[in-house]
Image: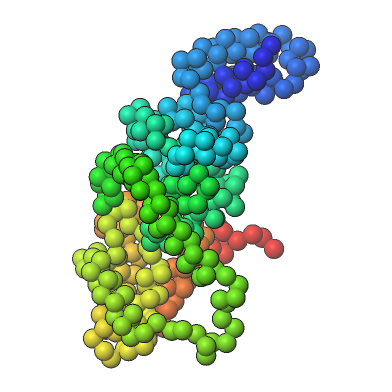
Amino acid sequence: MNFRKVSVALNVAYKLHKSQDVQICKLSLFHPNDVNSEPRKLNLLKTAIRYAETMATCCKPNRLALEKSPYLLQHATNPVDWYPWGEEAFTRALRENKLIFLSVGYSTCHWCHVMERESFENKDIAKILNENFICVKVDREERPDVDRLYMTFVQAVAGHSGWPMSVWLRPDLIPVAGGTYYPPRDQYGRPGFPDVLISLAKKWRENRQKFSDAGRKVLEVLEKATALDNVIVDPNSMNLPSKDCWELCMSQMIDSYEPMYGGFSRAPKFPEPGNIHFLLHVYGKSPESEMGKKALEMCTHTLRKMANGGIHDFVGKGFHRYSVDDEWHVPHFEKMLYDQGQLAAAFASAYLATRDKFFADIAEGILCYVDRDLSHPV
């Protein structure tokens, strides 16, 4: 019996049909003594093998069918010619002098599933990927080192981060472009994934040097920013932003501000507590100025709208990760510890700036939720 071939087939069958019997048989493959001692399991195994091999032939599993990660196995039947992270993919990229398309996610990520359904299972988009790129799929829970390395780049070039993370690398693994979720066509204020792919492939073919230089410059800035030599021990030696820098940032915040519902983006709408902290710092620097008053108004209005919206869990307390609509009404039902920490600090800071007990109560509710549901018992 070709155990490797059968294991691939069973992986695919289980992924497609979630059959408990197929999963039992898959486990039984590696315990032949148990199988031989139980006739029912042996018959079940033979049936599942025939069925799974048929399904595998129909669906043409890619290399990810041999992986152990649940996330990678979810992509085992995509028409995309996926590679796992490793030398096989890197060698081919060097040989064919193609960009690597690196996609990073995890098995319970909502937008990872959306992008798979919309793009990675689309044969036309898969054709563009397969013809122009070497496609690599990574589970961030298996390779947090890879995720952390390229997420730093994405944050720098895209101004935001998240999963699925989409990064384009030179054959020597230097990143040249990056982002997160891309829709199959222009929507949500984001360019369509096929257009992005075609544009990047064209740039790589026509002007590789200029394309590579841009990515290298970003990396140089990141290396300087994260170097240990740049850690400031003496606060008096800090290079604080100039007044012009503050005003430019405020101007950009005002331009992106949504006056009716608060916040600084369209749906999907994230709390972005970093923006709140920035506005409170602006207010703290000049509370009597027009800029300071505007900063406080944007900050408190946004916090009130979030606290009164569906993104705030009124029963269990705490905040969901984001709202799927512009009005903070419909939450994406996922709560993250890092969001709770930043939002608790934001609401507490708003209370200190205004002495409005509303903000203190929200901060207290967040901390009660963290203490009750997200803390490890001592």
Residue ID at (37%, 70%): 275
For the residue pair 105 and 241, the one nearer the viewer reads as 241
Place of residue 274 in the rendered image (x, y in percent of width and height, measured from the top left): 41, 69
Place of residue 166 in the rendered image (x, y in percent of width and height, measured from the top left): 43, 47
In the image, residue 57 sits, relative to residue 84, either above or below, namely: above
For the residue pair 276 and 186, the one nearer the viewer reads as 186
**Would residue 279 be found to the left or right of residue 109 on screen?**
left
**Would residue 19 be found to the left or right of residue 270 on screen?**
right
Q: How many marks?
A: 0
Residue ID at (57%, 70%): 227
Q: Quadrant of residue 213?
A: bottom left
For the residue pair 23 and 111, the one nearer the viewer reads as 111
Residue ID at (67%, 17%): 3
| The C terminus lies in quadrant | bottom right
Q: Quadrant of residue 129?
A: top left
Place of residue 26 in the rendered image (x, y in percent of width and height, measured from the top left): 64, 22
| The N terminus lies in quadrant | top right
In the image, residue 23 sits, relative to residue 69, either above or below, namely: above
**Would residue 103 be found to the left or right of residue 322 on screen?**
right
Residue 329 in view (yes/no): no
Color encoding of the figure: rainbow
Place of residue 359 in the rendered image (x, y in percent of width and height, measured from the top left): 39, 75
For the residue pair 95 and 362, the one nearer the viewer reads as 95
Residue ID at (73%, 15%): 35
Residue 268 in view (yes/no): yes
